[in-house]
Amino acid sequence: MLSYQTDRSQYPATGPDGKLEIDLESGKYLKLWQGPNHPGITGNMSVELTVCGDEVVEGKTHVGYLHRGFEKLMERRSFIQVFPIVCRVCVPEPDFNEYCYAAAVEELSGIEVPEMANWIRTLILEMGRFNSYMMYMGGQSGSMGLGIVGQWMTYVRDLMLDRFEELTGARVYHMFIMPGGVRGHLPEGFEDRMEGVLKTAERYLDDVEKVMFRNAVFKRRTKGTGYIDPALFEAYGVTGPNARAGGVAKDVRKDSPYLVYDQLDFDIPTATDSDIYARADVRYRDLRETIGLIRQILQKMPKDGPVMAKLPNVMHWKIPRGETYIKGESSRGEFGYYLVTDGSGYPRRINVRGPSYTHAMALLEHLIPGTNISDVAGLLVSLHTYPPEIER
């Protein structure tokens, strides 16, 4: 098992402001940039690396290369105009933003969502989790040189995007979960076509297990690398698979059930090694659980019923004064929206709690010193972050 954590006494001294005193003129250190264009899944984010030989001494996260400033944009839009903005906060997994915002508006407005809509919402969230994990699997394998897995996962993800397009009319920004419910029922024959996607996914995931998880090179590069001490979880706000890989079996779907998750049977995969391999393994097993959840939802959901509650005139919608926090379990951990209203036709304050902020800023910058340059991409991808959640 490899470990690139070395004696930190070799690092430069720390100044009174807590920052490393790095003398680039000495010739001992060199600054390099990882990103913003790279083959992983962390999007348009870059890390400013200070290296000594092939070892990273310091890493600083830089964001702002992508669309940003969503929270302030939302405060200047009516409640219904916010609806098409929220999905941009997390491009690969936009549906959690739609759900959290809609649920927050519904709670403050006293709107009761029809049962059928809750089942369809749950289905959409699991389809989004499926897509996010597919993107992660391809990125994690690609960061270690296994490009074929990325090609397989891109193909399977594209099949699920076909189902999204069939259901919502769009492949990336779906805008299907809206305050009051969802925009429509499942198309005729949707269940059969979805089963075809799931069977294809299972067939490829069998190959992923052989090519990726049983691969001696992948194991040697990931086991013992990128270790997160479980003692850091609470202080750094580590949630989701990053925490479950360190033995913390927390999942909002189980701990604070929402939608129809209390009517579904599923397990929460965990591991104990808390390294890159453990995080990949937890996500792989959770992806298998997601496939089972999609099947359960399609089998158990009502065959018919209303999918949208009666709403006021949305062009003149004023919501009573109040505040709420709505959370859910995204593929990367706890995802939440804090909404404050003042009785006007506009949100007073919206704050998004995305896992990427803590995982890709404080946590990454803590983990990266001592990492070999060749493992920086693998470490980045293993934290599974999406930059717009940071610069939101």
Image (cartoon, rainbow, N blue to C red):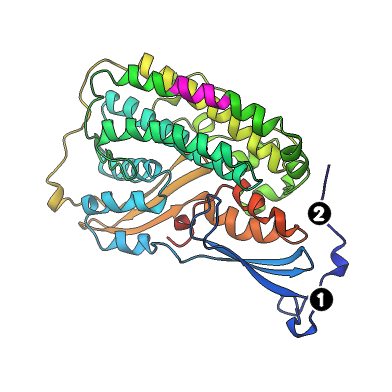
203 inside magenta stretch: yes
The answer to whether residue 84 is above or below residue 331 is below
Q: Are marks 1 and 2 in contact (CB under 8 Å)?
A: no
Q: Secondary structure at mark 1?
A: loop
Residue interval drawn in magenta: 198-205
304 on left or right of 243: left
Q: Image check: 259 left or right of 271?
A: left
Q: Toward which corner of the image does residue 123 lie, by quadrant?
A: top left
Separation (CA) of disc 1 from disc 2: 20 Å
Q: Which residue is found at the position 53% from the left and 30% from the top? A: 287
- Residue under the image location 60 percent in, 30 percent down: 208
Name the foreground residue: 278 vs 210.
210
* Residue receiving disc 1: 13
**Three-letter residue code for mark 2:** Tyr
The residue that appears at 24% across and 50% down in the rendered structure is 320
Task: Examine the image and state in which quarter residue 258 appears.
Answer: top left
Q: Quadrant of the N terminus?
A: top right
Res 4 label? 2
Crowd band around label 2 with a 10 angstrom C-alpha radius: few (<14), some (14–19), many (20+): some
Residue 74 vertical position relative to residue 327 in the rendered view, above or below: below
Residue 61, percent from left and from top: 59, 65
SS class of the residue under badge 2? Answer: loop
Please give the name of the residue rendered at 37% of the width and 22% of the height, measured from the top-left corner.
194
